[in-house]
Amino acid sequence: MADNVANPAVADGLAVAGVTAVPATAAVPAGPTVPSSLELYRTMRFIRRFEERAIDLVRAGEIFSGIHPCIGQEAVAAGACAALAPDDIVLSSHRGHGHLLAKGSDPGRVMAEMAGRVTGIDKGRGGSFHPSDFTAGVYNATGTVGHGAGIAAGIAWAAAKAGEPKVVLSFFGDGAVTQGALLEGFNLAGLWQLPVVYICENNRYATTLPVETAVAGTITGRGEAFGIPSSVVDGQDAEVVHEAVAEAVARARSGGGPSLLEMRTYRYHGHHTFEMLVRLRYRDQAEVNAWKERDPLDIQAARIDAAAKDRVDAEVELELDEVVRFAVDSPRPDPADAMDHYYADGFRPRPGVSL
Amino acid sequence: MPKLSYLKALNRALGDEMDRDESVFVLGEDVNFALTNVTAGFLKRFGPDRVVEVPLTEQGFTNFATGAAMAGRRPVIEFQIPFLLLLVFEQITNQANKFLMMSGGQRSVPVTYLMPAAGWRAGWGAQHSDQPYSMFAHMGVKTVLPATPTDAYGLLTTAIRDDDPVVFFGPLASLSVREIVDYADLAPIPLGSGRVHRPGTDVTVVALGHLVHEALAVAEELADEASVEVWDPRSVYPFDWAGLAESVAKTGRLVVFDDSNRSCGMGAEILATAAEEMRLVAPPKRVTRPDGAIVGAVPELDEVLQPTRPQLAEAVRSVLKSPGW
Ligand SMILES: Cc1ncc(C[n+]2csc(CCOP(=O)(O)OP(=O)(O)O)c2C)c(N)n1
Ligand SMILES: [Mg+2]
């Protein structure tokens, strides 16, 4: 499962994108190429079908936690991560599978992680909710909504001090913008002009809570208050997302400091797969339908050749068969290892009973 | 007679208190749609001034509740996930709980922090399965951990009526428990009063939260070997030390079954106080989570990170066999 099927930018090797005003001592990083329309389509198609296959595994009891599906929001992950270089860093959220795949995580190992297998990117210890994958530059996906913003600032600060021309992309939802810790992170990033691109995926709801009943002022106003260039972006169009993120990444990489991009998007499914069991009527079907009219995959498919689309769709199915097979066939962890990785020095805490 | 579930008991206790006392209101995330069922039917019944849907602003709304309490209201905050109590640990322990003393007794802060799903959530990842009641006891915040629907009703009622901050832990694993009750029998239960769930004469098993039900099953399994008393403190702070002493005076032997981490957990406090102050004829034991346990990643791993029935049975046998100090 080593081929980065979900990220053509990684799979194809990279050219310098001309956004590299880096310290003279640092190596010029490989910047991303501008992805082709087909590549963006492929990434999105992969993410959608990956999530649908994951939901099958939730139903089958293989993914015990259930998942927070990102179906409907694929253009944000695909467009944003295509603007990154391989050494750039992503901080994800609880709705993070798309971010991982678009950043180049091995999809079989991501699925194995979600299914709690030892072959998973975190050996099954992160699960669907808190995955990280340092091989792909995905450092964290905190369960504490909004608390990745400060972590992103710290990573960006350390990289900048080390003279590494890295950019940190920090994803969070509309629910995070009312969290004090997020604003504290913005302040540090703005104060020290750190190379962070904050991406708010405004899918209009935090669980059942509509954004307009939760947020005073605006989301972009929160960035502007800290002197951070902030804008609203059509999150259903992967090419628009890519362009906006590429500009923010270029600014960050050239020492121009952080940006905040509010992606207007929508999740088609429930907050979490438990909503398949518990009907919660917090949004109108008419609203869901209206958003589906602007489906990100349809928008992108209209830009590519129909035969190429069919070929990609078929390839994605074959790859996902292999992803699912790999995940399901992988071994489960041994209970004897339950306290592995607790401490860096291998220190083993006492068990819960002495007999 | 009706069957009362744990969640329905919480719903009923909170609703009854909101009916009884205008100053009581509930705030929390997804309370309008009653995601946890605790506030089911409330928006219609009490309106948006008393069912307050809040943004994801835990530190802010916990302080907000302190303010409302200082100004004469009795807020009940519903939290979704145990780690959120860690996020607001400062707001509860340092702001709300110290205020009466800091104001020289001028104003108390009657807030109830309701965590209706504490403990293990299988597979939900390491950040979702904590059980931090011992930490609140350590900081001296009144803390309750009822195991049954009747006790949940009684202790939530008392928590809301109490003039101090009270943290209420409803163990996730207890939420499925149902009891046949007569609603007329539901009544407040004082803080710091324990309960004998099963009388016995050979050994006292102190079981906390959902482990009460596990301990009762073990006591039944061991019925041919020993007479096990299952005692539930119901509040971890204040603690019914006199009730425990009475049980231990009868049995002389003690095992604690506690879902806290071992080091500095409630189990440690119970063993220490029993050793200091009670007449134990043999060294006591505790069955807990390991030191610093991180629970929640994978069910296979989690099962060895939480106290189990076989461990309790073995600990009971070992304490019974012990020749003494
Ligand atoms: C600080 C915090 N509060 C509450 C929760 C529980 N919770 C998990 S996800 C979520 C909704 C998040 O909404 P949003 O940020 O908009 O992201 P989305 O789920 O829409 O992708 C909530 C309330 C949490 N994990 N962390
Ligand atoms: Mg949202």
Image (spheres, coloured by chain):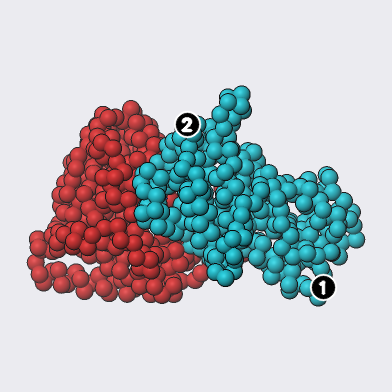
Chain colours: A red, B cyan
Q: Amino acid at mark 1?
A: Glu
Instruction: Identify which residue is drawn at 23% across, 72% down.
Output: A315
How far from the left and from the top, in percent, is residue B309? 68, 67
Which label was assigned to residue B225?
A: 1
How far from the left and from the top, in percent, is residue B274? 80, 49
On the picture, is B169 further left or further right than A155? Answer: right
The residues bearing labels 2 and 1 have C-alpha atoms spaced at a distance of 57 Å
Q: Secondary structure at mark 2?
A: loop
* Ligand 1 is within 8 Å of the C-beta of the residue at disc 2: no
Q: Residues within 10 Å of mark 2 (few under 14, many from 20)?
A: few
Q: Amino acid at mark 2?
A: Ala
- In the rendered image, residues at marks 2 and 1 fall on the same chain: yes
Where does the N terminus of chain A fall, quadrant-wise?
bottom left
On the picture, is A148 further left or further right than B21? Answer: left
Instruction: Identify which residue is drawn at 38% across, 66% down.
Output: A278
How far from the left and from the top, in percent, is residue B166? 58, 43
Instruction: Identify which residue is drawn at 32% across, 74% down.
Output: A321
Instruction: Identify which residue is drawn at 43% across, 50% down.
Output: A143
How far from the left and from the top, in percent, is residue A147? 41, 42
Q: Secondary structure at mark 1?
A: loop
On the picture, is B14 further left or further right than A52? Answer: right
Which label was assigned to residue B71?
A: 2
Q: Chain of mark 2?
A: B
